[in-house]
Image (cartoon, rainbow, N blue to C red):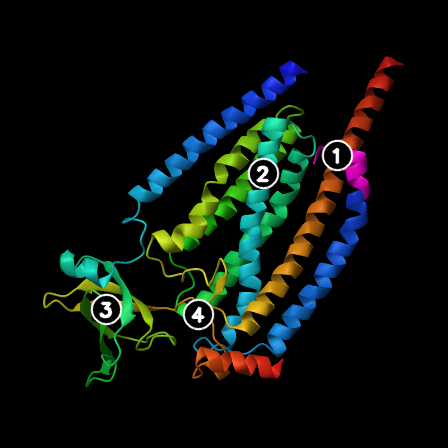
Amino acid sequence: MHGYANPARFLRLAKLLTAPLLIGGGLLAVAVLAWALAAAPAERLQGDSVKILFVHVPTAWLAMGGWSAIAIASLSELVWRHPLAGVAARAVALPGAVFAALCLATGSLWGRPAWGTWWVWDGRLTSMLVLLFLYLAYIALADAATRDGQGQSRIPAIFGLVGAVNIPIIHYSVLWWNSLHQPPSITAGKSEMAAPFLIGLMASTLAFSLLFGGVVLARMRAILADTQAEARLRRRAMNAADV
Amino acid sequence: MNGAIKAKHQRLVLVIVALVALIGAGLLAAWALRNQASYFYLPAQIASAPPEPGRAVRLGGMVEAGSLKKEADGITLSFVVGDDKARVPVRFAGIAPDLFKEGSGVVAEGRMGPDGTFVADNLLAKHDEKYVPREMKDMTEAQARQTVEETR
């Protein structure tokens, strides 16, 4: 991993991958969602509203995966002082927050026809809302730390690790506690989901993952360019002061 | 060099100790919350420790097959919510969600009546984790698999 600690080498790879990830993910997402709207079967109980599944579940997984990535980046920032770890964590936070919000919004739209309510304070819904708030807090904290200059990235990293406690809570909320949300349909080696739903879900998860990856790489490049431009400006200002 | 490695290891150990403490605290909190954080009571919990009549509680379980009846006034539903240990009769006047049916999950919001009947003022449908297309609902698993194979 430290081979990519060199930002120049990382930037070359990131530049190469950003466009294919965004375009590939976008095309696949359009294809899967068009299939879902036009051709996916209706569910035996829920009817057509089951199609929200193809957006709701991938966004939920990626919102949780996003924070896991922040936690791993925070760990390598705190322990190994990896120079790109803080950049990666900051880049993940925004798409992570957007995906958490999408998950909550689509879940609410789905809850109305399926359960008969837009929102309940059960364990799963509440812990997912907490994840959205954690993302917003992380974004604010990381921005403040960047404004304050170098050496402050440790505080968001600690927050990133502490917030990771919420990820297993989200996962186990439906198993530990009685909740309106149903337990997971897909567990290790076993799926309670019929093949058409499962295959569609896997395809849309792949599509959203590619998009997520593309956005993260684009944002990492933007953050690195920002840092570079700022350093250059500072150097120029110092030179001007010398003259 | 040696010093750098040492500092790195020190940080790693520190972070691991902090994480273990954190996860322990999280697990303890989750364990302590296991009753409070549950969204509803199971029929067995209601039967073994009935909440005082009038206190707002939620009851969740399966709508027992064959128990759902519409009363003479046309809007009051009565049914039995059960799990494998206990059964609680429920009365509800209002509009039930589409997915509310016998043999399916329900969460009833309301209170215990004096006669041991749960009086619900809202029903939420709780579905299970199975997703089955309409066309396959009456097939057995083997038939469904065969259909999927044929249409491939």
Q: Distance between the Cα atoms at labels 4 and 2?
A: 33 Å
Q: Distance between the Cα atoms at labels 4 and 3?
A: 20 Å
Pick the front one: A154 or A2: A2
On screen, residue B142 versus residue A25, left or right, reads left
Q: Bounds of the magenta span?
A: A1-12
Name the amino acid, label 2.
Ile
Pick the front one: B32 or A238: B32
Residue B50 visible from this viewpoint: no
Name the amino acid, label 3.
Gly
Residue at numbered disc 3? B82
Pick the front one: B70 or A165: A165
Residue B103 drawn at (x, y percent):
31, 75
Read off the chain for label 1.
A
Name the amino acid, label 1.
Gly
Read off the chain for label 3.
B
Residue at numbered disc 1? A3
**Dot 1 or dot 2, earlier in sequence:** 1
* Residue plotted at (53% across, 57% down): A103
Tell whether label 2 touches label 3 (CB within 8 Å).
no
